[in-house]
Amino acid sequence: MVAEPEPESPSDAESSASDGALATRVQRGDAAAFDELVRRYMGRAFAVAYRVLGHREDAEDLVQDAFVAALANIERFDVARPFGPWLFRIIVNRGLNARKARAVRRTEAVPPGASAPGASPQGEAERAEIRDRFEVALAALPERQRVIVRLFELEGFSSLEIAGMLDLSDGTVRWHLHRARRALREALAPLHGDDDDE
Amino acid sequence: MSDDPMRDPRLSAELRRVEGDLPLERVDWAAMRRTAAERAALPLARLRRGRAWWEYAAGWARTAVPAAVAAGILLAAVLARGNDSSDSQSVAPSSAVASAPAGASAARDALESAVTRNVAERGFVDAVVGPVDSAWLLEAVAGGER
């Protein structure tokens, strides 16, 4: 799950206000309420944006754009509903469009060995092979499946939450998730000598 | 949520190894918040002010203009069909407006004639915008060359 960024001491009234109350105030142009929504959601929003785009700076830009886009459409927002899923849907839509337009930078490379200090050369080679297999398997997945499996496995979102972001049914998300996980496990199977047991 | 499959720790670990962790420590949260606030200042001011009458008018225009165009096309089609059936019944179109004021404009007569196809297209154009004056045309061409 995402570690929320350090809050900058919002007032008690703001920090305890519900999303709906804050959104109602934003609809009247209340800057403090908007700032509280930004503070409240920027961590999760960045996680979603990063898992869609795979690049920190692009993800930061996307989060800012999404907050501004949400504000531009705030009059149409149903204050009886939670703000987060609505914001995340904006992020995912825009992020996927940006990827389609190839307007984003290449996914940031993970430094080799960064997650396995002190590994043996043989272990390093195996990890490199795993990385290669994973990259190929991930790259072969349809864009939506890739995003779904990242959000589910890495960020802990439920299939229902992901369905809200992608405007899909819960069942469709689970079907995509099953397909993606099976493809990734198949890519790993020769290395681990096991099979798909989902 | 209860229907979700279990997270696969090994798959998650491999994914994380490939994709990396979120670079949360590299994000300048304060700057992000500040920038969002700056970019929101104008839209928020607009929300505080409320929408001006021309913004409502522009909003309605987006619906009203296409609707008016569609209604115009529909009306023209209905009129044309009505006049076709009038023709087939050999009813003189001018009789329909026999009671019209005597000072009806030439343009209106020309339009009626065009709709009822009692006049050639060229005649209709001449009636509406005036006949082509060859002297004027020559003058225009000569002027353009000057």
Image (cartoon, rainbow, N blue to C red):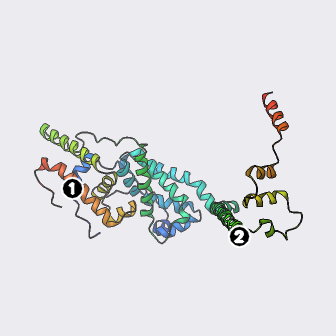
The reply to whether residue A158 is visible in this rendering is: no
Q: Which of these two is toward me, A150 or B13?
A: A150
Q: Residue furthest right?
A: B102
Task: Determine the secondary structure under disc 1.
Answer: helix
Q: How many marks?
A: 2
Numbered badge on residue B89: 2
Please provide percent x and percent y for residue A194.
11, 54
Q: Which of these two is toward me, B29 or B68?
A: B68
Whether discs 1 and 2 lie on one chain: the answer is no
Dividing the picture into quadrants, the one containing residue B112 is bottom right
- Give left or right: position of B12 versus B109: left
Task: Determine the residue positioned at 27% across, 62% down.
Answer: A175
Q: Amino acid at mark 1?
A: Arg
Q: Are marks 1 and 2 in contact (CB under 8 Å)?
A: no
Position of the N terminus of chain B by quadrant: bottom left
Q: Which of these two is toward me, A15 or A153?
A: A153
Q: Amino acid at mark 2?
A: Gln
Q: Nearer the viewer, mark 1 or mark 2?
A: 2
The reply to whether residue B37 is visible in this rendering is: yes
Task: Determine the residue positioned at 28% across, 63% down.
Answer: A174
Residue labelled with disc 1 = A182
